[in-house]
């Protein structure tokens, strides 16, 4: 069985979020896919079940080291890139993935260096949370949390708590308390915690982001399309940039040595829903043959 490794949301090789993509994995059971994902030990690993389309898309399953996900951002972009390059072998404009959360179309720009873009499921906005225990979870001072906008759970297939912080230094200072963090996630029924500030390290970027997860030794994610898609909807809903439409660049992964860049677009529709697209670059790293016992 062939597999490919790519870096997603990366500006250079060995930045961004690494992903392993397996092709022709329909003969594997879910337990076997889970075992391979655990052996790969990336944040996520994807499995393209067949080289043939079904209902206009390619059947794909996404696994972390511990469980299967209905949707995830960087696996969607990276898998679509490999499907076009290794299966379709034609410069098509769109590749559609059939995921457990629904169909996700991924669009390709012109030129090899153009970022890929995925249209996400419109975010749903859940409860607002208090800042009482979050300072302890994040290892920061209570005043580092920006009280002008709410802490809110947002869900686009994966739930994330969006936490606004007051300064770039506050975001960079976060140090997760793992026990308090697990308790916070369990109480709120989510798997990711995103902190952000509308400042940036790099000129030309708009938002600095960190995303914390609790999955088998991955306390922080270098680039997270699903959570940043939730953030894009949040930025529009709460008019963080003063508009019902945004087109911003979010930097992530700087604190863990894998700097990433995500292109976030979101627009509020007439019915009140928010349309979200997340884009980024995909860089091939390696490929090989997986030897099964």
Image (spheres, rainbow, N blue to C red):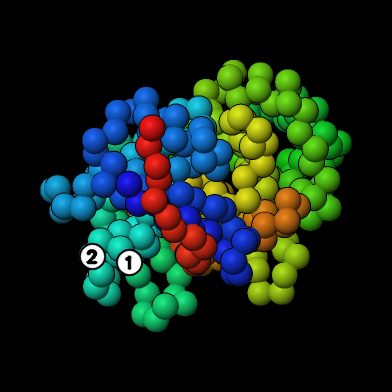
Residue extending farthest to the bottom is 111
Of all residues, the one furthest to the left in this rendering is: 55
Q: Indicate left or right for 116 with 137 as reference.
A: left
Residue at disc 1, secondary structure: helix
Residue at mark 1: 85
Image position, residue 61 (x, y; %):
33, 39
Residue 115 left/right relative to 179:
left
Task: Determine the CA span between mark 2 and mark 1.
Answer: 6 Å
Q: Which mark is residue 97?
A: none
- Vertical position of residue 140 compared to residue 104: above or below: above
Residue found at x 37% / y 29%: 32
Between 207 and 92, the one lying in front of the other is 92
**Above-or-below relation of 73 to 287:** above
Neighbour tally class for label 1: few under 14, some 14-19, many 20 plus, Cα within 10 Å: few
Give the residue drawn at x 44%, y 58%. 287
Q: Is residue 214 above or below residue 229?
A: above
The circle on residue 88 is: 2
Question: In the picture, residue 206 is in which quadrant?
Answer: bottom right
Viewer-proximal residue among 110 and 243: 110
* Quadrant into which the C terminus falls: top left
Q: Residue 19 in the image: x percent, y percent?
A: 49, 51
Residue 111: x and y, percent?
A: 39, 81
- Is there CB contact under 8 Å for labels 2 and 1? yes
* Residue occupying the point 29% across, 33% down: 28
Name the side, left or right, on which 24 lies relative to 218. left
Above or below 85: residue 235: above
Point 48% across, 46% down: residue: 226
In this rendering, position of residue 56 left or right of residue 22:
left
Q: Secondary structure at mark 2?
A: helix
């Amino acid at each position: 069985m062939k597999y490919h490794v790519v870096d997603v949301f990366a500006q250079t090789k060995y930045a961004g979020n690494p992903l392993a993509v397996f092709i022709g994995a329909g003969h594997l059971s879910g337990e076997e896919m889970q075992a391979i994902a655990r052996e790969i030990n990336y944040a996520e690993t994807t499995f393209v079940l067949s080289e043939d389309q079904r209902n206009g898309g390619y059947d794909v399953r996404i696994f972390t080291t511990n469980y299967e996900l209905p949707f995830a951002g960087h696996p969607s972009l990276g898998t679509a890139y490999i499907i076009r390059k290794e299966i379709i072998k034609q410069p098509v404009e769109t590749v559609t993935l059939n995921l457990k959360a629904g169909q996700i179309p991924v669009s390709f720009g012109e030129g090899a260096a153009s970022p890929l873009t995925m249209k996400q499921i419109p975010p749903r906005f859940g409860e607002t949370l208090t800042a009482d225990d979050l300072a302890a979870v994040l290892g920061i001072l209570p005043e580092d949390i920006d009280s002008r906008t709410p802490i809110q759970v947002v869900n686009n297939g994966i739930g994330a708590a969006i936490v606004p912080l007051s300064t770039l230094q506050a975001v960079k200072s976060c140090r997760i308390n793992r026990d308090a963090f697990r308790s916070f996630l369990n109480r709120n029924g989510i798997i990711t915690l995103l902190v952000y500030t509308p400042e940036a390290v790099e000129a030309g970027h708009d938002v600095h982001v960190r995303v914390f997860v609790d999955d088998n030794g991955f306390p922080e994610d270098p680039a997270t399309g699903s959570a940043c898609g939730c953030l894009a909807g949040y930025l529009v809903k709460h008019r963080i940039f003063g508009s019902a439409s945004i087109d911003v660049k979010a930097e992530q992964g700087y604190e863990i040595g894998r700097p990433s860049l995500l292109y976030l677009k979101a627009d509020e529709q007439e019915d009140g829903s928010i349309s979200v697209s997340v884009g980024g670059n995909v860089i091939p790293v390696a490929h090989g043959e997986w030897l099964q016992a």
